[in-house]
Image (tube, rainbow, N blue to C red):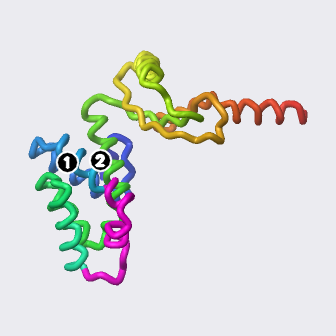
Amino acid sequence: MENSGGIQASLAGRYATALFDLAREEKALDAVEKSLATLSAAVAEVGDLRRLVTSPVLSRAETGAGIAAAAKALKTDPLTTRFVGVLAANRRLDQLGVVATLFHTLAANQRGETTAAVTSAHPLTADQVKALKAQLKTRLGRDVTLDLSVDPAILGGLVVRIGSQMIDSSIRTRLNSLAHAMKG
């Protein structure tokens, strides 16, 4: 199987790649990407929906009906609605979040974007985000989408992950390096 845009040939990767190919054929990449993000966020935030997705007790029909109702309520596009029905029929709804992430990566690659996971000790301001995007675009030569998260444990600075590359300018890492050097 082809390794599309760095997506591993995992189960979720195969589902994401198949959905991506269908969405591209139907010219619905943006709609599907938005619908997947909405659905996976709802699953993460709503306990009843999370239980629906992960419950081994519910039948395939019950799970399918429940996810179809959720998709309708969230106004997902028709392709995504059919896709989650397939996931439910195959008892793979627990893969929805991973599929959404992988689909986003494929869609970003299609648009010529790179996604950078950025961890900071405090939330970044709009100006800081803009400056970081500009620096990364200059460094990489392509547009960069930022996936921002906050982790006070890094104390300060940033940790930027782009694919397998990591730029760690966090104060925690610098302190650990200094402590290691002092042990000598």
Pointer 2 with pointer 1, Cβ within 8 A:
yes
Q: Position of residue 9 (x, y in %)?
A: 36, 54
The Cα atoms of the two marked residues, 2 and 1, are separated by 9 Å
Circle 2 or circle 1, nearest the eye: 1
Q: Main secondary structure of the magenta part?
A: helix
* Near-viewer residue (169 or 66): 66
Q: Nearer the viewer, residue 80 or 10?
A: 80
Q: Which residues are magenta?
A: 40-59
Residue identified by numbered label 1: 32
As drawn, 59 above or below 162: below
- Residue 129 in the image, given as x and y percentages of width and height: 44, 25
Screen quadrant of the C terminus: top right
Report the residue marked by disc 2: 103
Q: Position of residue 179 (x, y in %)?
A: 83, 34
**Label 1 element class:** helix
Estimate how packed mark 1 is, as few (under 14), some (14 to 19) or many (20 or more) residues with alpha carbons within 10 Å.
many
Please name the amino acid that badge 2 sits on.
Phe
Q: Residue at x 28, y 53 (%)?
A: 16
